[in-house]
Structure formats: C-alpha cells, structure tokens
Amino acid sequence: MKRLVLSFLFSTLFIPLAFVSAQDKPKPEDTEKKSESTKGITPVRVQVVFTEYDGEKKISSLPYTLLVNADERDGTRLVVSILRMGLRVPIGTVTPTGAAGQFTYQDVGTNIDGRAERAEDGRFRLQLGVEKSSVYSSASSQKPASPVGNETPPVIQRFNYQVNLLIRDGQTIQSTMATDPVSGRVTKVEVTLNVVK
C-alpha cells in the first residue's frame, strides 16, 4: 500500500514538471521581429505652451505635454500621438417663433496631434496639428465666459495651425504668433522637444 501511495505522489508531483519544462519556448524569429519593430524608436516629450498677451501684459500661459515615439510606424505611416482636453458647451437654439428650442453641443478646448521622426543630422522632424478654442461672451468685453447660464449666445474663439518643425533635443522654438482680430490679444506658441531617457 505504501508503494502505491508513493508512486501516486511521485506521478502527481513530478510528471507535471516534465510537461512544464517541455513547453514551447518563443522562437528566436518572433523575438527578432519584436525587437525590429521597436528598433530605432525614440520616445520624446513634446511640450506646447500657449501664451496670451494683451499688449505687453501676459494674460495666460497654458502648457500641454504629450509623448511621441519618434520613428514609430504603422506600416508606412508615422504613428500619431493625440491629446484632447476640453468640454462640450451647450448652445441653445431658437425656433422661428422665438421660443427656446433644443441644445446643441460644441466641443471647446485643445486638440494636439503630433508625430516625429529622426532626421539624418540628429534633429527631429516634428509635425504638429493644433486646435485651440475657448468660449467668449459678446457682452463681456472678450473675457472668457462661463459656458453655461449666459443670456447672450457664446462666441467661440478658434485657433488652428499645422506646423512642421526641425528641432533638436532640448530646444525650444517659438513656432507661431497670431493676433486675435477682435480683441487684439496676441497668442504665441512655443514648442519644446526633449528625448526621454
């Protein structure tokens, strides 16, 4: 009986270990494919800062940071890093009789799309698509308005640009400057790129 119990214990404890060690190990080709797909990818941190001026006075400074994998591709196209920050503003509609109608919603905030690739001289080709919008009330002298509870319909200020920059690690570039035609305020956009170590 002891022999029977010992042989049963031996078979339940040691035979499964033989199966575990005999399992397929990853093929060298599979690990090579994975390393080739990440080979040459350089993670970079891109900071985009919107600074608004009223004359010489700085009104606001809004920084946004996104991580971009330089030279990461999905087939032949560079992979895009996307940042979305904002809210949906209800905008009331009025019926032809002047009665309050339904609400529609407008997206307001900041959208940044970025992709990068390493240039031959060590710099990076950074492609940015930026859209920034904010709510203003026409009755408030172009000051930012509360998105809800206004008697007057909101005015939505929009800032769009796309840029291709050639930028070094650690460099900051003032990529764009634009003047709001209504308020006269100036928006400057600075872009900084840093390689993530």
Image (cartoon, rainbow, N blue to C red):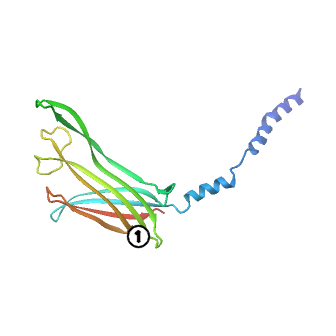
Residue that mark 1 sits on: 168
**186 or 115, which is in the foreground?**
115
Q: In x, y percent, where is residue 114?
A: 39, 57
The residue sitting at 73% across, 44% down in the picture is 23
Residue depicted at x 32% and y 68%: 173
How packed is label 1: few (under 14 Cα within 10 Å), some, or many (20 or more)? many
Q: Residue furthest top?
A: 1
Picture coordinates of residue 27 (x, y %)? 69, 52
The image quadrant where one finds the N terminus is top right
- Residue that extends furthest to the bottom in the rendered view of this protein: 121
Element marked by disc 1 = loop
Number of numbered discs overlaid on the protein picture: 1
Residue 102, x across and y down, in percent: 21, 31
**Residue at figure coordinates x 76%, y 44% from the top left:** 22
Tag 1: amino acid: Arg
User: Is 147 on the left-hand or right-hand side of 6?
Assistant: left
Rendered residue at 47%/56% (across/down):
77
Residue 159: where, in percent of width, then height?
Answer: 25, 55
